[in-house]
Amino acid sequence: MPRLKKQKENTIKRSRRKITPLQTVKGMRDILPTEQFIWEHILNKSRSLCDDFGFKKIDIPILEYSELFERGVGQTTDIVEKEMFSFETRGGDKVSLRPEGTAGIVRSYIENGMSRWTQPVKLYQEGPMFRYENPQEGRHREFHQFGFEIFGDGCPAIDAQVIYLAWKIFQKIGIKNLTIQINSIGCGECRPNYKNLLTDYYEMKINKLCVDCKKRLAKNPLRLLDCKEDKCMQVASSAPQIIDHLCGDCHNHFKNTLEFLDELELPYVLNSNLVRGLDYYTRTVFEIWSSDSDLSANQSSLGGGGRYDNLVEALGGGDVPAVGFAFGIERIVKKLLNDKISLDKKNNRQVFLVQLGDAARKKALKLFDKLIDNKVSVGESLGRGSIKSQLKIANKLNSKFALIIGQKEALDETVIIRDMESGIQEVITMDKVVAEVKRRLKK
């Protein structure tokens, strides 16, 4: 019998091991309350500055027709070729989870007739994006971006304004030693000749290229300059520079953009290998880097953007110049954590409610509601029975006052106000406690 019992126990153990606990899908992650205060810090600073610069928020769908990204982002980009989450609906429509935000905003600009609005139109958006790539530290298949766009103005001053806003956001967030990496990739007039020069150069170096770059050479030679493989970076260092082959208009546009940045006294570096990874970019492209970044060399960019003057027309709208910028929030969270930048967690409470017994809890719930309505920051721990343990929580939350309601106070309709710093206590009637708390907090 003992042997049969042991066999039964072993069988149960083996069956338990087969059960897989519920967990997130590969490449997805939870953003826990312990991290939320960092996200709110980043988003609040970004939203506030966008509002100061005259941008208005727009929310676009997470799901779009796949053709939008195929036409907008580019058929030969890594995003469209191998990174999109695409599927057919029950009705047979081919749709994709958005891999980036600009194409969807351009679609909205066209669909909602924003070209008839007062130009330029300034929009910002935030939210999740999805790319099917190998998950690694700081990069997930679901990630979040904050971005902003300006439509309807091709002036170099607009390029400079977008760059300045991007730089200002990171500065306000608390990141130090920022630099702007900037380049011009020309337009439809000058880029074809440069691509031919680039192709000729790389064909002579083809044996030194990685497998992906050998494929890019035929499809999209500009992307060769952006490869992060060491051997490809060495080849790119001697490649022809597009800035030497710009047409007159692109040269003047870039020159004027840099002059505006000089006027703003922004630190920038001319980076001839900066091309960005999406087909819709024209003329100015840029990234914001932090020179003391703890990120790896392949992740030194905090965010990037540029001008895309042909995208609105390519998606069926008119000839509308545009420029934009976006950054991944996860990367900025990681940067803040790595740099140990001190942030206000905003978990302090001005007042803490302490109660003992069911009758006191009922009074505390009603008082809590009154304090909230009067804009008083209040904490509580209704499940705790010990006054001592509740006062410890009040100390952790840096509460200035504790409002104590015991069984006697519940019967007498009174509250004990305790000054948490001095320990001095005073009894106040329930109907006067909110006014007294506000008076003391103001004092």
Image (cartoon, rainbow, N blue to C red):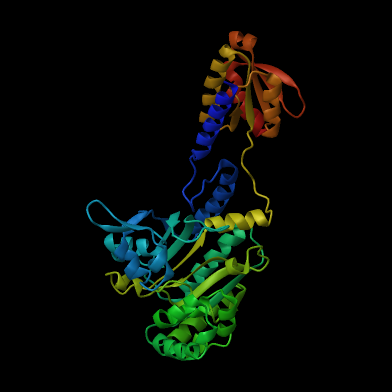
Is 337 situated left or right of 208 in this image? right
The residue that appears at 52% across and 88% down in the rendered structure is 205
Number of marks in the rendered image: 0
Task: Give the vertical position of 253 relative to 105 (above or below).
Answer: below
Q: Position of residue 213 (x, y in %)?
A: 48, 78
Q: Position of residue 375 (x, y in %)?
A: 54, 33
Is 323 situated left or right of 114 in this image? right
Q: Position of residue 163 (x, y in %)?
A: 52, 69
Tell me the quarter of the picture where residue 215 sits. bottom left
Q: Is residue 118 visible?
A: no
Quadrant (top left/top right/bottom left/bottom right) for the C terminus: top right
Q: Is residue 137 visible?
A: yes
Q: Nearer the viewer, residue 128 or 26?
A: 26
Quadrant (top left/top right/bottom left/bottom right) for the N terminus: top right
Residue furthest to the left in view is: 91
Residue furthest to the right in view is: 422
The residue that appears at 49% across and 81% down in the rendered structure is 254
Tell me the quarter of the picture where residue 112 sits. bottom left
Q: Position of residue 335 (x, y in %)?
A: 62, 58
Q: Nearer the viewer, residue 50 or 217?
A: 217
Task: Give the vertical position of 194 relative to 90 (above or below).
Answer: below
Q: Nearer the viewer, residue 86 or 394?
A: 86
Is 186 situated left or right of 168 in this image? left
Task: Give the vertical position of 421 relative to 118 (above or below).
Answer: above
The residue that appears at 61% across and 61% down in the rendered structure is 171
Tell me the quarter of the picture where residue 196 sits. bottom left
